[in-house]
Amino acid sequence: MLRIIATRVVLGILTLLAVSILIFAATEILPGDVASAVLGQGATPETLRVFRKELGLDRPAHVRYAEWFTGAIQGNFGKALTNKRDILTSITPRLKNTLFLAGYAALIAVPLSVALGILAAINEGKLADRLANIISLATISVPEFFIAYLLILFFAVKLRYFPSLSTVFADMPLSKKLHVTALPAVTLTMLVAAHMLRMTRSSVLSIMSQPYIEMAFLKGLSRTRVVLTHALPNAAAPIITVIALNLAYLIVGVVVIEVVFVYPGIGQFMVDGVSKRDLPVVQACGLIFAGAFITLNTVADVLSILVNPRLRHPV
Amino acid sequence: MAKKTLGRRKFLALSATVGASALAACAAPAAPAAVEAPAAVPATDVPAPAAPEPTAVVEMATAVPVASGKPKGGTLRIGMEGGSATDSLDPRTYSDSVMIAAALCCMNGLVEFDAAGNPTGELLESWEAKAGASEWIFNVRQGITFSNGKTLDADDIIYSIGIHRGESKSPAKGILEPITEIKKLSDSQIGITLSGGNADFPVLLGDYHLVVVPKDFTDWEKPIGTGAFTLESFEPGVRLVFKNRGGYWKKDRGNFDMVEIRNIQDPAARTAALQSGEVDAVNRLDPRTVDALMKDANLNIVRTKGTGNRFCFVSRVTDAPYDNKDLRLALKWGIDREQIIKQVYNGYAVPGNDHTLDALNPFYNTKMPQRVYDADKAAFHFKKAGITSAFELQTSEGAWGSAVDCAQIYQESLKKAGITMGVNKVSADGYWDNVWLKVPFCAVYWGRRLSADQVFRQIYGSASDWNDSNWKVPAFDDLVAKAAVELDNTKRTEMYYTCQEMISEDGGMICFAITDYLDGYSKKVMGTDPHARYDLNDDRIAEKGWFA
C-alpha cells in the first residue's frame, strides 16, 4: 500500500513539472506581448522597443523558462512587469483570502452536503430525498452570479444584514471577516453542494445493491445502520474524490464570485495579469492553481486508498 | 493620451452584463419596463449636438453656490471601475480612471481645466506665448510645499516633465514630442521651445500623466506630491487610502479627512454598493439600470452629456473597396445612429457626426448638419460606387463591450438600404494589436482630447501612428498647422470648422455615438458638478467635494 501511495505522490510532482512547462509555453503564445498590452494605445514603436528591452523580452524563451522555474521552486516569482512589485508579496495576502473563503465555504458545504446525501440515501424515494435533490439541483442550475446578485439584492441592499462589498483587509478581526464574507460563502456553498450531495447519495445507493448489504438487511439491521456502517465506508472513495474536486474548484474557479462580491482573491489577480499580459504574474498564479489542484487530487487519491477496506487489508 | 478611459478588460463582460441586467430587473420592481423602455425616461430624446454653449449640454448640475468655508471632515469612499491589480503610482503607467483619480489625491498637475474645459493654472500658475506660439514662458506657482516639506520650484517641474521624454515608455511621450527645449529661467519660471507653433500647448500640459513630484524622485510606492492628501495604503486592484495632510494650497478644496478609493470592476456591484451606502460615489453607472437609480431619493445621478468615449467604425481609405468615396458616404448615411443609441446606450449618448470632436469643444462645428439615417442616400451612393465584391466589418467585445451589438444593428440598417455587409466577430484578446490599424474595416473607440489640434493631428494627421483610417490629406494637414499658430480666434474657428467638414465628408471614419458619463453619488456628497473632461468631476471629486 505504501508503494501505491508513493507512486501517487511522485506522479503528482511529475504532473506539476509538466504543467509548469505548459504554463510557460501557453503564456509565450498569447497574442500580443506585455509591452503593447501595458502601454495600450499609448504605444508607439519606439516606446515599445524601449519597454521590451527593459523587460528582457528580447531573450530566448528557454533561457527565461530555466530562470523562472529555478526561481519559482525557491519561492521567488520575480517582480511584476507592470507595477514592479514583488509577486510573492502581492500574491500571499490574496492567496490567503482565497483559501479563507474556500475554507469558509467548505466548512459549510462539505458537512451539509455529505449529511444530506446520506439522509437522502437512507430515505431513498421519500420526501426528504426528493426535496434535497430538487433544491440542490435548482441552486446549481442557475448561474453563480445570479444567485450572488439575488443574495446581494435581498440581504445587502434591501435588508442590509450583510455588506454588498465583501472586500476583506489584513487588519480586520476574524468575526468581521466572517460577517462580510458570509454572502460569497453561502453562494459558493450552493454551487458545490449539489455535486457532493448527489455523489454521496448515488455512491451509497450503488453499494446498497451489493449482496453483502442484502445480507445485512437479512440479519435484521435497520436501514440507517446498514447505510452508516456497511455501505458508507465502501462508498467513501468516490465521495472523497468529489469533495477534493470541489475544494479545488473553490480555490481556482471562483473569479466570477470574486468580481461580483469585490473579493480580493487570487482569481481576479490572475485575470488582471492576463489582460495586462503581465507574464510573471500569470505564470505564478497558474503554477499556484496547478499546485492546489494537483495537491488536493493527490490527497484525495491517498485518502481513497487509506479508507478502502480492500486496499487497507490486502489478501 | 491613452484613448482608453474605459477598461479594456472584457473577461467577464458577458457575465457582468447579464448580471447587471438581472440586478436592474430586480432593483426596479415598480418599473420593470425601465430596462427595456428608454422612451419612458426623461431626456432620452437626444437632440443633435448643435448646442452652441457648453452649459446647454451639461445636465443636472447640482448648482451649488461657491461659498467659502465649506464644511470639513468625513471619509469619502469612492467605488470605481478602471483599476487593476497591476496598477502602479508611477505616472508613466497610468491608463485608466482609478490611477488618474488616485494621482490627483496626492499630487497636482501642471495645468487643470475648468468645468467648461478651458485650461487654468495649477502648479504652472500662468503662461504667455511669444508670437508664432512656439516659444512659451510658464510661471511656477510660489509658496507650495511637497508632503516631504520641500518647496516647489522650476527644477521639480522640469524633472516631472522630463520623465516622460527621451528614453521613456510613457504614453505621454508622444504629446511632448514637439518640445525641443525646456529651460529654467529662474526658480519661478521656465521657458519651453516647440518645434512648431501650437496655440493649444498649455492644454497638452494638462494631460493626466503629467503630475509633479520633487526633482530626482523615484520611489513610486510612496509618492511625494503637493496634493491635498498623502497616501496611507495602496493595494493594487483593491483600494487606496489617503489622509488629509492639512493646509491645502487650493482654497476651499481638500475638505475630506480621509479618502478611500475602492476598485469595483463590476457595474452591478458598484450600483449595489452605492445603494447600500457602502460607498459615497461611483463612476460609470450602467446606462441600462440608471433610470431605476434616478428614482432613488437617496442618490444623486450626475450625467455629463456627450463627453465620454467616441464609438466608431473605421475604414482604411487606402484599402479596397474603401478607397471609393461613394462607398464611404453610403456607409455613413446607412448607419442608424438613433437606433443604436436607443437600443445599446439606452439613450445615454449623443450621435456622432463622423469626426471625434464633441459639442463641448469650443471649436465644435455647429453649422454642419448632423448626419442622420437615410436609406435612400445610402442606396444612391452605394449604387454610384458600383461595389460588387463582398466586404465585412470586424468587431469584437475587445473593442468595447457592446461593439458587436452596434455592428449588428448597423448591418440591419444597411440591409434596409439594399447594402450587404458581413459582420465578423473576432477575438477580444489582442484586438488592439492584431485588428486595429491592420484590417480595412473595424470597430474602434476614441477617448476625449481637450484640444481640437490634438484631435486633428493624432487621429487624422498624416504624421500620426494612430491615423486609423489612413486618411492622409496634405491640404488638411496644412490647415491644421495653420490653425495651430493662428491666435485670432474667429479665423481659427473657421479653419477648424473646415477641418471637421473635410473629415466628415471625405474621411474613413463612421463616428456614430459619443456616450454620456454617468456618476452616482449619495445625497450628502457636494461638489459633484459635471465636468467637460472626465467623470467624477474630472476625477477630482476627492479634492473638490465636501460633505453637506
Image: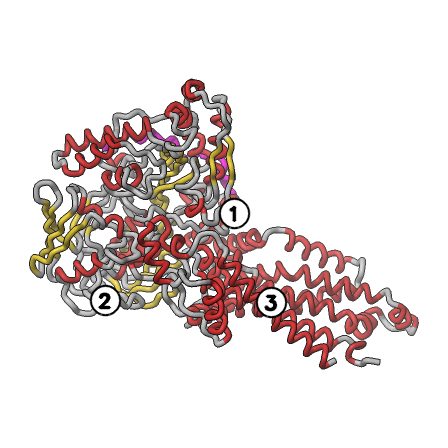
User: Is residue B205 part of the magenta span, yes or no?
Assistant: no
Q: Label for residue B217? A: 2
What amino acid is found at the position of numbered circle 2 in the picture? Phe
Q: Label for residue B14? A: 1
Q: Tell me residue B313's x, y (percent).
A: 41, 35
Q: CA distance from mark 3 to mark 1?
A: 27 Å
> A243 or B278: nearer the eye?
A243
Nearest-to-viewer mark from 3 and 1? 3
> For this view, does B219 lie left or right of residue B441?
left
Chain containing mark 1: B
Query: Residue placed farthest to the right in the image?
Result: A218
Q: Label for residue A293? A: 3
At mark 2, the secondary structure is loop
Q: Is residue B27 above or below residue A168?
A: above
The answer to whether tags 2 and 1 share a subunit is: yes
Q: CA distance from mark 3 to mark 2?
A: 44 Å
Chain containing mark 2: B
At mark 1, the secondary structure is helix
- Work out whether residue B276 can be spotted: no
| Mark 2 surroundings: few (<14), some (14-19) or many (≥20) residues within 10 A | few
Residue at 42% x, 46% y is B432
Region of the chain picked out in magenta, as a range: B29-53
Q: Tell me residue A170's x, y (percent).
A: 43, 71
**On the image, which quarter does residue B94 sit in?**
bottom left
Nearest-to-viewer mark from 2 and 1? 2
Q: Main secondary structure of the magenta part?
A: loop
Residue at 79% x, 58% y is A126
- Asked if the residue at tag 2 contacts the one at tag 3, i.e. Cβ–Cβ closer than 8 Å, the answer is no
| Quarter containing the C terminus of chain B | bottom left
